[in-house]
Image: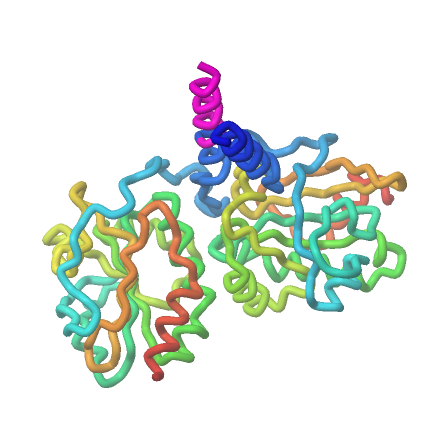
Amino acid sequence: MEKKRLIQFILVIVVLSIFISVPMVFAISDAYKGNIYQTGTLKPIDSVLKVKVGVQAPNFSLPSVSGEKVSLTQYPGKKNVVLSFVPAAWTPVCSDQWPGYNIAKDIFNQNDAILLGITVDNIPTLYAWTNQMGQLWFPVLSDFWPHGGVAKKYGVLRSDGVSERALFVIDKKGIIRYIDVHDINKRPPLEDLAAALEKLKK
Amino acid sequence: MKKILMVLTIIILLFSTLTFSALPANKPPEKGELLPVINLPIPKNPDERNYLGLSGSGSFKISQIKAKVVIVEIFSMYCPYCQKDAPGVNELYRLIENNPDIKNKIKLIGIGAGNSLYEVDVFKKTYNVPFPLFPDKDFAIHKACGEVRTPYFMVVKINEDGTHQIVHNQLGNYPGAEPFLELVLKASGLK
């Protein structure tokens, strides 16, 4: 009987420890005021990749917030490309991710890389959302129609129609060199992407 | 034997639960209240150590900073308003450092909510931040401070006897260096 009680006690402590050590928090910038929709904790990954490191990156052509169409064929031979898929405008982690990249332009420049931000939102939504981030130096592309077509091609379209929080690094030959399909609830640490870009030089 | 092992497990688990440096809070600490327990690493950079009046290595608590008032900014490298306000907060540092009457009385630190050391350094380099910034990679401090939105300013008065209390809290709305300094001086009783 005593043993049973001890086991129960251990269980309570374990549960308590988990609650304290795995906080689900997001540092939301006051820039968005009360306009961020709380999604709660989501299934970390909800898709199956259709590409892998070492293969040719599937081509695409998408409209950007600034008006012009951006195609992946523009870059081979000229620039390394980072694709940053984020799930949706006006959600907690996404709203904090690109503003960080916005002040990390040096890291992209030093590695001769361009960043393309992509979501499945339509252009007007992306326009309003990215306006809150200040002036972004990189194109923001809308994978709205056919819905999530590019995300689907890469295998990062989730079952509810938003994309994963995923990073792809594509070299100047158009070959995928790094993939991070991140836990949708967390922001990928910038140092991991920086290290992947540094590796392109080798 | 089994019993001893179980007791040991309980002790270890209890210990790991209780030694978290900052426990989560539902709301930010209010004016007149104490700061949550925040342990920060003593900076390796000697200039930053001198600025805070600390020595040695290991960790310190904000109330151990050698000052009468400490301004704590909870920021994030990823937060557009923190980025926009950064030059103005730097200006606040310079206003204080260039005024011999308050130079050694008011100190400024930043805590990067959810930011790794690398990310804090990107922010520091981008904006030439002249005061110490500390990473809070796992959001432990951010959570202890009631998961405030950023930037969030806390003005902490440190008393002669080593006790402290928060004399002003502010979410965003940074009014610029001069009005903010005026506010800090009034709230802390330095003026």
Inspect the magenta stretch and tell me whether residue A3 lies in it.
yes
State the residue at coordinates (15%, 56%): A155
Residue A64 against residue B191 in the figure, above or below: below
In which quadrant will I find the C terminus of chain B?
A: top right
Q: Which residues are magenta?
A: A1-14
Q: Position of residue B82 (x, y in %)?
A: 55, 54
Q: Position of residue B42 (x, y in %)?
A: 70, 58
Q: Nearer the viewer, residue B85 or B103?
A: B103
Which residue is situated farthest in the top direction here? A1
Q: Position of residue B141 (x, y in %)?
A: 58, 44
Q: Nearer the viewer, residue B128 or A57?
A: A57
Question: Magenta stretch mostly in which secondary structure?
Answer: helix
Q: Nearer the viewer, residue A76 or B84?
A: A76
Q: Tell me, what colour scheme is on the image?
A: rainbow
Q: Position of residue B75 (x, y in %)?
A: 56, 51
State the residue at coordinates (47%, 65%): A103
State the residue at coordinates (89%, 56%): B101
Q: Nearer the viewer, residue B145 or B39?
A: B39
Residue B90: image quadrant is bottom right
Report the number of discs. 0
Inspect the magenta stretch and tell me whether residue A87 lies in it.
no
State the residue at coordinates (49%, 39%): A21
Left or right: where A196 falls relative to B10: left
Residue A151: image quadrant is bottom left
Residue A30 visible from this viewpoint = yes
Residue B96 visible from this viewpoint = no
